[in-house]
């Protein structure tokens, strides 16, 4: 596949639409508005990765980690794995063209209907038929599927055996993976999944249905222009109408090769920089005078999400990816998630939870034993440093992704011009006790030891961590309740109390708009609400687009040139 992104030197001064960020929300907006005939530019801070270019060995990871905390700034600002160390909670997000879709596990679930029945949402969300239509469109493009042979995977069988502790059997998890070779709706020829397990490291096969292989190539095929290395700082009303977007060039380009801020203007700006990114841009914009809701930054949720481990189980699990080409032969790893245990509490939604068995990417394999050693409990880890992780104790390492509900009581603020999360009570949220109890029971049943966080006590401290940050620009009926309305339009904070007036042409469309936890992995809902927002935007502005798949004479290979 040739690159979708072009040099920032070719950015024009004005577009109909500028989309900031290129995850699920940004991908949907770029594709739909380009299909509607708009001149669209996408500004993404990260780099473009073609299939075959994701880190597959430990040394490759070095350049792909960015670590930031109150007194810490390490790694490249375009590193693929973006870790924010917080005083109360850590957050892991993706950075690159395609956003979190590049490194996520791809589990695609629709929340319990009680989530949308919560009055915290504007009534229109559950009340019009466009939510269902949004989910239907999202499913046609990201194509959740189940691995037919999921139940045969060793890790699935290990979960089934451990599930006895909770009186539950696992079910197959829908993941956005092409298990058979296909030409996708954007005309990209995706090979079949090799079950290498490396989904969270970046799929080097081209089988994961990322935004970079679906919505973004579709947008480009309809004329959108995509730019990487463009980190947007803030937005402001343009003197001649529309919006001025100021960004920093991370490619070392620009006047005299300095990282001087550059600008572009557009009639419509869609902020889709993810929960942390979009909230940060609006917080900074407010500091520069843009009137916004007082709710900005509030109701941050970690989606009751944790990653945890079981060490020393009796049965093999085979939950360390082998990569492609495989680093070891003959291991049936499977996609990152094959099975999940669902616990539904009919009386109290907050108690419902889903536990998924997960796989760690193969690039981490050489370092994995060292990660477990600091705890001092796991001396077997030392042996594996020498013998490798595909046999011995790490062959029975259980990795769990668990997701549930929290109280969405975090708050995003600007500290030294950077986004920071404050949530003093985070680690005492009841959800963590529930998840620990369930996971401990599973691990005990398997004969192992529960390791909540192998790095607790190191620089990670005892804080919880999430890969599902949500909120900060939550939806509401009016500006006293939310930052955006049900169509994702940003409320005008200068309007009177209780007013629902919006800033014409300014939208937030990503995980930031969630006013509460979803209780399931969020990608499908973010995509569905983005599709829904596009339907409303088209109605409001008299636009038309068809969202169906296209057939092209020449399908595109996802592989980087030279690797096809
Ligand atoms: C390891 C991992 C596993 C996960 N597994 C799952 C799963 O199985 N299922 C699931 O549903 N979810 C999963 N998630 C979460 C899911 O990937 C995210 O919720 C989702 O990607 C969020 O989509 P988004 O559109 O809100 O933004 P993102 O996907 O985060 O995209 C935002 C984009 O904006 C860019 N950006 C940020 N700031 C700026 C700026 N200032 N200027 C320009 N660009 C900017 C970012 O680089 C990024 O590309 C996982 C996440 C991780 C990290
Ligand atoms: S298991 Fe391997 S081939 Fe399949 S989607 Fe995940 S990374 Fe790609």
Image (spheres, grey):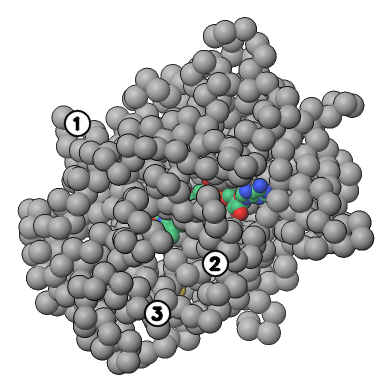
Where is residue 278, by image quadrant?
Answer: top right
Image x and y of residue 38, in percent: 78, 40
Query: Camera-side residue: 181 or 239?
Result: 239
Residue 66: where, in percent of width, then height? 56, 62
255 displayed left or right of 562: right
Distance between the alpha carbons at the discs numbered 1 and 3: 41 Å
Q: Quadrant of residue 237?
A: top right
The x, y position of residue 155, in whole percent, is 24, 71
Query: Residue at position x 26%, y 88% from top?
Result: 383
Foreground of the two, 315 or 220: 315
Q: Residues within 10 Å of mark 2 (few under 14, many from 20)?
A: some
Question: For mark 3, what is the residue?
Answer: 367
Is there a contact, CB below 8 Å, between mark 1 and mark 3?
no
User: Badge 1, how many Cα within 10 Å: few under 14, some, many 20+?
Assistant: few
Q: Position of residue 337 (x, y in %)?
A: 33, 63
Sequence order check: which comes first, mark 1 or mark 3? 1
Residue 235 visible in the picture: yes
Task: Say what secondary structure mark 3 lies in.
Answer: loop
Q: Decide if ligand 1 comes within 8 Å of the CB at mark 1.
A: no
Q: Is residue 162 visible?
A: no
Q: Is residue 50 left or right of residue 521?
A: right
Query: What residue is disc 2 on?
Result: 65
Q: Mark on residue 522?
A: none
The residue nearer to you, when weighing 370 against 564, is 370
Residue, x 83% and y 52% (percent of image)? 260
Classify mark 2: helix, strand or loop: strand
Q: Which residue is mark 1?
A: 348
**Which structural element holds mark 1?**
loop
């Amino acid at each position: 596949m040739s690159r979708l992104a072009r040099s920032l030197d070719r950015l024009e001064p004005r577009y109909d639409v500028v989309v900031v960020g290129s995850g699920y929300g940004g991908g949907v907006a770029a594709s739909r508005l380009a299909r509607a005939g708009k001149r669209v530019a996408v500004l993404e801070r990260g780099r473009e990765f073609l299939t075959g270019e994701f880190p597959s060995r430990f040394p490759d990871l070095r350049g792909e980690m960015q670590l930031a905390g109150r007194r810490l700034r390490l790694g490249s600002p375009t590193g693929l794995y973006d870790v924010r160390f917080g005083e109360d909670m850590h957050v892991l997000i993706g950075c690159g063209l395609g956003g979190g879709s590049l490194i996520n596990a791809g589990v695609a679930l629709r929340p319990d209907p009680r989530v949308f029945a919560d009055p915290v949402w504007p009534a229109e969300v559950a009340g019009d038929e466009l939510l269902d239509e949004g989910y239907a469109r999202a499913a046609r493009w990201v194509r959740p599927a189940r691995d037919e042979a999921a139940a045969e995977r060793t890790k699935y069988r290990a979960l089934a055996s451990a599930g006895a502790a909770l009186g539950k059997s696992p079910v197959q998890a829908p993941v956005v993976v092409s298990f058979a070779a296909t030409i996708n709706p954007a005309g990209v020829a995706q090979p079949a999944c090799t079950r290498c397990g490396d989904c969270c490291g970046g799929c080097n096969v081209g089988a994961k249905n990322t935004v970079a292989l679906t919505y973004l190539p579709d947008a480009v095929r309809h004329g959108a222009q995509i730019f990487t290395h463009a980190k947007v700082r803030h937005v402001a009303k343009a003197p001649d109408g529309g919006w001025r977007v100021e960004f920093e060039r991370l490619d070392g380009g620009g006047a005299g090769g300095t990282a001087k801020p550059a600008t572009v203007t557009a009639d419509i700006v869609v902020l889709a920089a993810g929960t942390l990114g979009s909230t940060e841009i609006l917080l900074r914009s407010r500091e520069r005078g843009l009137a916004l809701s007082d709710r900005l930054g509030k109701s941050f949720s970690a989606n009751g999400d944790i990653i945890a481990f079981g060490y020393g189980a009796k049965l093999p699990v085979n939950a360390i990816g082998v990569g492609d080409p495989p680093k070891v032969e003959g291991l049936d790893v499977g996609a990152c998630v094959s099975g999940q245990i669902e616990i539904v509490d009919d009386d109290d939604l907050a108690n419902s939870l889903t536990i998924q068995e997960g796989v760690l990417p193969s690039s981490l394999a050489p370092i994995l034993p060292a990660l477990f050693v600091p705890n001092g409990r796991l001396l077997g880890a030392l042996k594996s440093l020498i013998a490798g992780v595909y046999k011995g104790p790490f062959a029975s390492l259980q990795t769990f992704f668990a997701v549930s509900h929290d109280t969405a009581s975090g708050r995003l603020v600007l500290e030294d011009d950077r986004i920071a999360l404050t949530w003093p009570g985070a680690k005492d949220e009841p959800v963590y006790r529930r998840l620990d109890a369930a996971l401990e029971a599973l691990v005990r049943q398997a004969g192992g030891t529960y390791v909540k966080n192998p790095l607790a006590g190191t620089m990670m401290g005892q804080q919880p961590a999430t890969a599902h940050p949500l909120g900060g620009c939550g939806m509401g009926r009016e500006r006293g309740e939310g930052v955006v309305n049900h169509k994702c339009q940003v409320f005008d904070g200068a309007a009177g109390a209780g007013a629902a007036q919006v800033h014409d042409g300014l939208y937030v469309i990503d995980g930031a708009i969630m006013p509460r936890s979803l209780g399931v992995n969020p990608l499908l809902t973010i995509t569905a609400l983005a599709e829904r927002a596009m339907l409303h935007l088209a109605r409001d502005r008299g636009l038309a687009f068809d969202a169906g798949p296209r057939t092209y004479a020449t399908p595109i290979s996802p592989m980087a040139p030279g690797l096809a």
